[in-house]
Amino acid sequence: MSDRVLFVHARLLDPADGLDRPGELLVENGTIAALGPNLSRHGLGADVRIVDCAGCCLAPGIVDMRVQLREPGDEHQETLATGAEAAVAGGITTLAMLPNTVPPIDDNALVEFVSRRSREIRLAAIRTYAAATKGLRGGELTEFGLLAEAGAVAFTDGLHAISDALVMRRALSYASTFDLLVVQHPEEPSLSAGGAMNAGEIATRLGLAGITPAAETIMVERDIRLVEITGARYHAAHVSTAGAIDAIRRAKARGLQVTCDTAPHYFALNETAVGQYRTFAKVSPPLRSEADRLAVIEGLRDGTIDAIASDHAPQDQESKRLPFPSAEPGIVGLETLLPLSLELYHNGSLGLLQVMRALSQRPAEILRLPGGRLRPGAPADFVIFDLDRPWRIDVTALRSKCKNAPYDGRPAQGKVTRTVVGGRTVFGLDS
Amino acid sequence: MDSGAANDPFPHRHLLGIEGLSRREITYLLDRADIYADQPRGAERLALLRGRTVINLFFENSTRTRTSFELATKRLGGDVINMQAQTSSIKKGETLIDTAMTLNAMRPDVLIVRHPESGAVQLLSEKVDCAVINAGDGSHEHPTQALLDALTIRRRKGRLEGLVVAICGDISHSRVARSNIHLLNTMGAHVRVVAPRTLLPPAIDRLGVEVFYDMKRGLAGVDIVMMLRLQTERMHGSFVPSIREYFHFFGLDYAKLASAKDDALIMHPGPMNRGVEIDTEVADDIDRSVIRQQVEMGVAVRMACLEALSRKAHTAPVS
């Protein structure tokens, strides 16, 4: 069997090099050996297997930097295997899962467990964050150094903000000792407590307690001050408000090592999606106003927002079929990450390379992971997708164990046809 | 979707809220309730709900609303079953949906539901075949309260249109306030809200009300003063520093009432916290206070609602 595969008739996209042109890509022993406009003329020999991309885009595999999987602890909602299967169907070749499992990932044995299962599953590479504080309780720091050596990509308390200012200061300060990254769920809990959706007219009409956008802005602004005095690397997850984006824009201009991501629901939806108490539209932070949604798109456009992550949060019927205030927040997003992000290209908000940069290059750089680029010597992790193919999102067809997505029936444009990890095809649309 | 003929005066399967009801539909319910309110005591039981089962499903404590619905059902000749959350399997961890399905299997004709969470009654209505009446969901709506308030006002003032109504107190947590704002606006009244800012929800002005933080100014020239109960059980943290301070600035007493019209009516959905939001003497002023009439109108309004919804229950398909 040949270990060389030549992908021909591809539209090669590499945001890192500004590459967007027709060409071919050669994979050898799981890494990218060469790429260019016409490799096939160079006499590669008879043992090369040819894959015809039929004009589809071939881009670096998506690096999804914010995913909740439910193993260990809540395997009925999602396992590492079902999550990885959904991921590759969505063109994701590497994902970073949050430590909010049961038990939480705050010990190197659990980090190693995830790495081992990832190798066994052999689909998308599953990496994990480690808890920043023991038991995600917001108090004592975990063993950052040892956890990083075991393979933790960064440190976060997942769905909880690291809210105590002193604990956050120490987390940033200690992380900077080893040049590690701290990822924050930026929401001031004393302001968001009891809230079910964005504060405003809709919440008032529905009689739901609102969460002010200031809860996010305040936490981001506070953290930026702490980054200033510690010099640490800091990442704000799923930013959703104009205020927070503006604060990050200014911090970047001052040269601080501050990055952030957003999730598709913060640019594809706004608070009106809650409609009449649709719990599938309940997320944390909540869907915001139209002005905030536009600010998220502007943040992506000018590069203030570095990355788009799925914020995949599987919730079963028991967690969602409840009165709105009691329902769990979260949307499953692994398989809709690419098509929803491509909406920004199709509607003229972003260039195609900008979209792909936010999905692959930037998250790989932020987490210092291999991949995110197409270049000789890099791992052959890539996604092939038909940029224009129209389809409708059907939540029942999602591979994730849970179907909690508010996108059922939404028209989409752009479909993954093949996902390749380490040179192996791990997903094929027609297979 | 709601079914019904084009000439159906109330073409809805459920009564979940006032928001979305038309002026014509509200007027119809009030007109029917007016007739029931005028029936002499001891009048013969009606047969409208004969053979029909109404279930009162209350996930929150309530005496007056539950009793009022019970009485309304009985006066229309129906059978009524009361289910209180404490005695049902809800306490054993059964979900709201499970409860709805179980009750649905018993084929009731009308479910009357009160629940502490906003939206819970609508959720339940989506899972059952019978008509559902919202008897109060969280801070969202309490439509029969707004209807009985409107009936009380209409019978005393002869109209709703053009009246100036001040709703005072804990607007944030009040389903009564929201239902009344929708109803009074739909019927052409002018609505004011008067409260400290901590008890006003964001963007309340977008619901079409004039906002006042000063009670005397808010009551200036009004026809109706609607007081709300300070809902301490729904409060997350401290919204007002003390009851003493609250009563001083926002409690209804004769001094503040003086700025309202001389014939202004005083209303309260009950139960009252005397000395918190309303002075005892004002509450018991037989010339001004219509608080007891409100309770009386409650039965008539609920009869009208049961009538309007159960009429469709005859033809509703059973799935």
Image: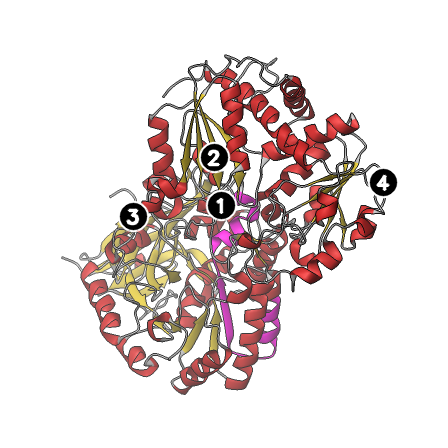
Q: Which of disc 4 and disc 2 is earlier in sequence?
A: 2
- Residue indicated by mark 1: B117
Whether pointer 4 and pointer 1 mark residues with C-beta atoms closer than 8 Å, the reply is no
Residue located beneath label 2 in the image: B113
Please, which chain is the residue tagged with disc 2 on?
A: B
Q: Position of residue B158 (x, y in %)?
A: 78, 25
Which residue carries the number 4 mark? B261
Residue at the image point whose x is 42% and y is 56% from the top: A310
Let me know if marks 4 and 3 both belong to one chain: no
Mark 3 — residue? Answer: A401
- Residue B248 rendering spot, x and y as whole percentages: 74, 59
The x, y position of residue B228, in whole percent, is 66, 46
The residue under label 1 is which amino acid type?
Glu
Quarter of the picture containing the N terminus of chain A is bottom left
Name the element at disc 3: loop
Say if labels 4 and 1 share a chain.
Answer: yes
The range drawn in magenta is A246-274
The C terminus of chain A - image quarter: top left
Query: Per the image, is A256 magenta?
Result: yes
Report crowding for label 1: few under 14, some 14 to 19, many 20 or more residues within 10 A (C-alpha). Answer: many
Instruction: Tell me what residue is drawn at x 50 percent, y 34 percent.
Output: B66
Q: CA distance from mark 4 to mark 3?
A: 63 Å
